[in-house]
Amino acid sequence: MGPVGAPGRPDLATLVLLRRVRDRMDREYAEPLDVEALARGVHLSAGHLSRQFRLAFGESPYSYLMTRRIERAMALLRRGDLTVTEVCFAVGCQSLGTFSTRFTELVGVPPSVYRDSGATYRPGMLPCIARHVMKPVRNREAVSPAAFVS
């Protein structure tokens, strides 16, 4: 932390690097990214990147990346033309079990149920409302599975 940052907050130069890391995760979510590779890309240690990322954005780099992957998976599952396994690998996850567990935590239902029952999105919905409705929640705040059963 440099002199510009407030105590316990990343300085401006570090924030620039963290934004690069976050932008890279947004662009390359389907690639095999890990904290070490992300840290190398901005010349930081993995531990320092993780600590500063959490201070700046309120979550770990891994959590942020998984949320991006789950958001993309939700869109692919809504299309209905891919299996859950195909979606898992298409969004960069290497383990179907981890993907399914994290999907269920963020969305509230397993990916197979989400795919089969459809989402709460309806054609003609305003984009701002669709983004709100379709965004996965964090910290295990997903709605109960009963909300998906009509």
Image: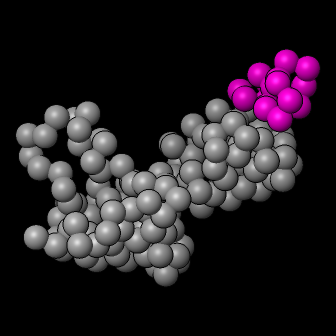
Q: Is residue 115 visible?
A: no
Spot occupied by residue 59 in the image (x, y as percentages of width and height):
63, 49
Q: Is residue 104 above or below residue 35?
A: below
Task: Check residue 82 for magenta coloring.
Answer: no
- List the single residue furthest toward the right: 3
Q: Residue at x 36, y 49 (%)?
A: 135
The extreme bottom residue here reads 97
Instruction: Locate the N terminus and report the quarter of the image it occupies.
Output: top right
Q: Is residue 22 above or below residue 10?
A: below
Vertical side of 57 occupied by 73: above or below: below
Q: Is residue 6 shown in magenta?
A: yes
Q: Is residue 7 left or right of residue 86?
A: right
Q: Position of residue 36 (x, y in %)?
A: 77, 56
Q: Is residue 29 above or below residue 73?
A: above
> Which quadrant of the figure contains the C terminus?
bottom left
Residue at horizontal 20 percent and vertical 68 percent from the top: 148
In the figure, is residue 146 to the left or right of 107? Answer: left
**Relative image position of residue 46 (x, y in whole percent):** 81, 53
Q: Which residues are magenta?
A: 1-16
